[in-house]
Structures are given as structure tokens and as C-alpha cells.
Amino acid sequence: MVDFVWNVRSPLQQAVVPGRAGAIVAFSGVKLAEIRDFDLVQIFARRGQREATAKAVKKHYGVEAPAPRQAVFGKGATLIWSGPDQVMALSARKPGTFRPLDAMRESFESIASLSDQSDGRCLIRMSGPQVRSMMAKLTSVDLHDSVFPVGAAATTSIDHAAVNLWRSENSEDGSPVFNVLVFSSFADSIWHTIVDAAAEYGIEIETRPAASS
């Protein structure tokens, strides 16, 4: 009998090649990173349990539940609004520990449904001085500071694929940082679309472990 060994691999395992890409320029205008080793749980408030779920979120993560079109950075996790009465909790995966559902069940029992989306999504982080110009080719969301500040979030689409988009704290060079969660089945297509859009500005590509924000 043949034994099978299943190894968990990112859908972007072959697509993401760390290094420089695109136009040859002195300084890369766009920085791209696939964030790996994260846990992601979607929290759905049950009928009539919106306020109770919001209280449970605050108790579990130490911050208020995100308002519509908002992301907040809580105790060990980023909480992203993903629709009416829906929140996604993103956290760095810790080897040797229980998956987040185990720690969340008691807090949300009978008031919310929990869905582990960890291996069903890919997370791409984008920054750099030309990142807004690049994003303008991909989404109709206005990403200007005045309307999409740090902590803003949106459910939108890139290349006809649904994504969750939010803004983190600015990078060390002062450029904005945008995050995109995409279903794993669309990840390869979305990645190449982003790379094509960023090519004229020069790209720096990397992979790294998950961060809570």
C-alpha cells in the first residue's frame, strides 16, 4: 500500500520569486510580499446577536469590533470588517499551538458562527512610493489619505475576483501599506495581475511570516 505524505504549500509557491522584477530603476517603486503562516477566522454574528458578538470580540481581542469599512489592530490579531455582521480575525500562526477556533469557541458559543479560512486565502502586502499609482490600475477604490487612511477597509475586486483590502500602518519609508486577502484559487492570477501593474515602477518581491497587522 502506497503511503501519501501531504505537504502544505502556498498556491503562490511557484509564482513568488524573491528579488527584483519589472523595470530596471535605482529604487523599487513597489514592494510586494506574500505573507505566509497565518490563521484566519471569519466570525458571523447570528440573527439578533450583533451586539453580543461585538462584546465578545472586544473581550477576546481587547479592542472594539471594527465598524463598517474598517480594520482594527487588537490583541495578537487584526480584525477586518468583511460585510454586515461579519468580521475576519487574522493572526500569525504559532507552531505547536492550537488553531484559533479552539481558543475562540467559548467566547463566541451560541452567539456567532466561526469559519476557519486559514488555508483558503492568500495574503499579499503591497507598499512603496508608487503603490497607489499601481493600485489605481487594479481597483476603483479611492486610496487617497483623506478617504482611505490607516485602518480603512473595503470589500472589492481585482481582475474580477473578490478581495478584502485594508490599510496598515505606513512603512518605515513613509509609504502606505495595503493588504489584500484573496481566495487561494484566484491567488496565482491576482499575483500576476499585480506584478504586471507594478512592472513599470520596478518591483521588490519577498516572502515572510505573518504579522498580526
Image (cartoon, rainbow, N blue to C red):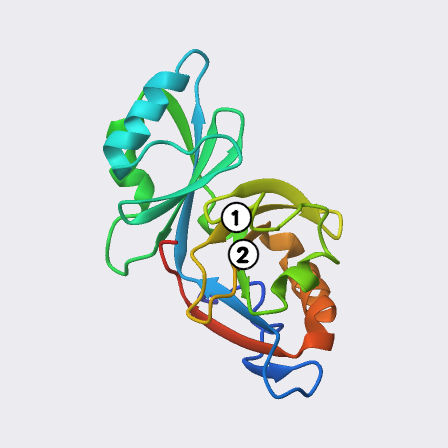
- Image coords of residue 58 (percent x, y): 28, 31
Residue plotted at (59% across, 54% down): 184
Q: Is residue 8 visible?
A: no
Question: As shown in the figure, which amino acid type bears the numbered disc 2?
Answer: Phe
Residue plotted at (66% across, 54% down): 186
Apparent side of residue 134 relative to residue 213 in the rendered image (left or right):
right
- Of residues 26 and 118, the one drawn nearer to the viewer in this rendering: 26
- Image coords of residue 18 (percent x, y): 54, 80
Q: Which mark is residue 166?
A: 1
Location of the C terminus (image quadrant) = bottom left
* Few, some or many residues within 10 Å of mark 2 (<14, 14–19, 20+): many
Indicate the secondary structure of the residue bearing disc 1: strand
Q: CA distance from mark 1 to mark 2?
A: 6 Å
Apparent side of residue 41 relative to residue 197 in the rendered image (left or right):
left
Indicate the secondary structure of the residue bearing disc 2: strand
**Of marks 1 and 2, which one's residue comes earlier in the chain?**
1
Kindly indicate whether the residue at mark 2 contacts the one at mark 1 (C-beta within 8 angstroms): yes
Apparent side of residue 111 relative to residue 1 in the rendered image (left or right):
left
- Of residues 30 and 35, the one drawn nearer to the viewer in this rendering: 30
Question: As shown in the figure, which amino acid type bears the numbered disc 1?
Answer: Trp
* Few, some or many residues within 10 Å of mark 1 (<14, 14–19, 20+): many
Which residue has dot 2 on it?
A: 178
Q: Is residue 27 visible?
A: yes
